[in-house]
């Protein structure tokens, strides 16, 4: 029989997709938790919007409340688990909890991307832990891997598929030709999408996660507004077809890259060579590719969303808090950024690009287009020209060699201004293989 100490009482803010999973894991893995931390875990109070709602998990209704202060101010509650989402109201709850000396575990990337520095400073001031593993890539323990597993290395590049909803949508559109709206509805029904799915499809959710990753990986105070963002809503069937024909897979990719002391962070639909380690990451799965100067290439893969996978990360953070409580070392893990933030300018960011253009099908059109690329010193890696059904128009698809973002954007502008160009239909970043 184990020597079991007094239970740790937990207050939950939210009992939706993730909150239900947290309750299930705490109940189903209670023996394992006792073995690891030496005491049981009890969920003492749960904040919800509607106490009468039917739920995926059975809880005693006396635990439910619609009043946040009944959870946050309960003197017997040691740890607040925040899985309600939202920003301003949630920030106030968590500041209040930390100021009362309660440890906090959160899955909320919206909040951590915007107010992470403030919340972590408040946690440290009050001797509290604030852990947020579930906020990036759901069930993948990527934050702990960056700050502990790779603590001795200098990380120079992170590339991530960090939004399960968009990966699910792109996979179903590419593999099965399913329409965008139908797959988005499926992702919502499966609990992958945010309450407002525009945050997923417009790239904001992934941008928040990349800001958190870049801040930890590069030890630099990267803000959400430092991330260049483009979502998946403009991707067409034609783009996906060309991408396949040219040997690429279209993914929404977050890239954080540092050269010397300067960093770039972006989220955008990207064409990956089929042989790229991230190209085979399908459905709602996430993966983060990390390059460290000493370790070389590493990749972390797993479910990026969903009830139980995300709850695993939340409860693992709870275990970390409880271990710290036992050792009496809470509030000592947050480390201030080591480097001053320096961001690359557009002329310092390099990539290959895919562009699809509709042009008038007339003598000399092609030469005018190639001249614009040549004047900017950008050469072609692949090129296709095909007739279109629309009379008098042709489609040109180009994949460039590496060019600066500045040079490429200037080319796009000049193409749009060209009389023979009917429309620049689409444009995407193209990655090479691995690092
Ligand atoms: P959800 O299913 O919408 O659940 C939210 C829960 O919080 C519900 O129980 C809701 O109460 C409660 N709630 C929300 N606002 C409230 C308020 N103002 N007052 C009282 N209760 C409130 O959300 P979720 O998918 O579990 O996501 C929770 C958090 O985890 C979010 O920050 C999300 O970004 C993050 N996250 C989610 C996933 C995922 O796969 N879903 C993965 C990683 C991270 P009612 O039930 O009464 O409506
Ligand atoms: N909506 C998010 C996603 C949930 O699809 O990845 C996990 O953060």
Image: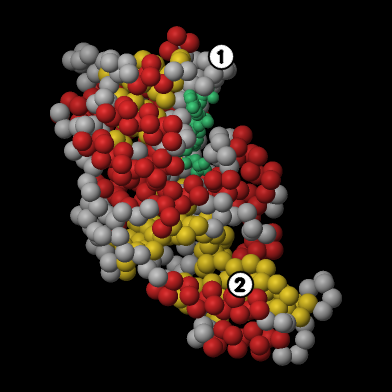
Task: Judge the density around disc 1: few (<14), some (14-19), many (≥20) Cα neighbours within 10 Å.
Answer: few
Q: Residue furthest right?
A: 391
Q: Nearer the viewer, mark 2 or mark 1?
A: 1
Q: Earlier in the sequence, mark 2 or mark 1?
A: 1
Q: Give 383 or 117, whichever is nearer the viewer.
A: 117
In front here: 341 or 311? 341
Label 2: state its secondary structure: strand
- Is residue 105 positioned above or below 336 on the image? above
Colour mapping: secondary structure
The N terminus, quarter of image = top left
Lateral position of residue 330 relative to residue 41, left or right: left
The residue at the point 27 percent across, 21 percent down is 78
The answer to whether one can see residue 312 in this image is: no
From the viewer's perspective, is residue 347 above or below residue 136?
below
Find residue 52 and name its label: 1
Q: Position of residue 351 (x, y in %)?
A: 47, 72
Q: Is residue 56 visible?
A: yes
Q: Which mark is residue 355?
A: 2
Q: Secondary structure at mark 1?
A: loop
Q: Position of residue 373 (x, y in %)?
A: 56, 84
Residue 12 x/y as whole percent: 40, 23
């Amino acid at each position: 029989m184990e020597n079991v100490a007094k239970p740790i009482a937990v207050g939950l803010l939210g009992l939706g997709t993730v909150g239900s999973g947290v309750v299930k894991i705490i109940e189903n893995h209670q023996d394992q938790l006792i073995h690891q931390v030496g005491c049981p875990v009890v969920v003492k109070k749960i904040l919800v919007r509607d106490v009468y709602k039917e739920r995926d998990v059975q809880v005693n209704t006396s635990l439910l409340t619609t009043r946040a202060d009944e959870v946050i101010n309960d003197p017997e509650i040691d740890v607040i688990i925040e899985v309600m989402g939202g920003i301003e109201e949630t920030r106030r709850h968590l500041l209040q909890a930390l100021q009362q000396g309660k440890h906090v575990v959160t899955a909320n990337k919206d909040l951590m991307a915007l107010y992470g520095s403030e919340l972590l400073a408040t946690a440290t001031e009050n001797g509290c832990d604030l852990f947020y593993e579930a906020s990036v890539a759901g069930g993948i323990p990527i934050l702990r891997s960056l700050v502990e597993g790779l603590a001795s290395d200098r990380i120079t590049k992170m590339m991530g598929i960090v939004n399960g909803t968009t990966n699910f949508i792109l996979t179903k559109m590419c593999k099965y030709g399913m329409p965008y709206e139908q797959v988005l509805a499926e992702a919502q029904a499966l609990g992958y999408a945010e309450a407002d799915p525009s945050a997923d499809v417009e790239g904001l959710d992934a941008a928040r996660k990349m800001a958190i990753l870049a801040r930890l990986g590069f030890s630099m105070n990267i803000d959400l507004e430092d991330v260049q963002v483009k979502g998946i809503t403009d991707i067409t069937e034609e783009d996906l077809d060309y991408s396949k024909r040219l040997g690429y897979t279209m993914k929404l990719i977050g890239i954080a890259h540092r050269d010397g002391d300067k960093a770039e962070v972006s989220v955008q639909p990207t064409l990956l060579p089929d042989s790229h380690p991230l190209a085979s990451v399908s459905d709602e799965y996430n993966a983060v590719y990390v390059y460290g100067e000493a370790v070389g290439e590493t990749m972390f893969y797993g479910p990026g969303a969903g009830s139980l996978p995300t709850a695993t990360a939340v409860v693992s953070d709870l275990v970390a808090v409880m271990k710290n409580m036992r050792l009496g070392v809470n509030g000592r893990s947050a480390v201030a950024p080591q480097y001053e933030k320096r961001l690359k300018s557009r002329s310092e960011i390099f990539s290959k690009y895919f562009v699809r253009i509709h042009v008038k099908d007339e003598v000399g059109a092609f030469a005018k287009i190639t001249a614009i690329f040549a004047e900017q010193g950008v050469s072609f890696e692949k090129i296709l020209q095909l007739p279109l059904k629309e009379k008098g128009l042709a489609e040109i698809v180009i994949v460039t060699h590496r060019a600066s973002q500045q040079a490429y954007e200037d080319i796009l502008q000049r193409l749009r201004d060209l009389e023979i160009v009917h429309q620049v239909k689409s444009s995407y970043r193209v990655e090479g293989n691995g690092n």
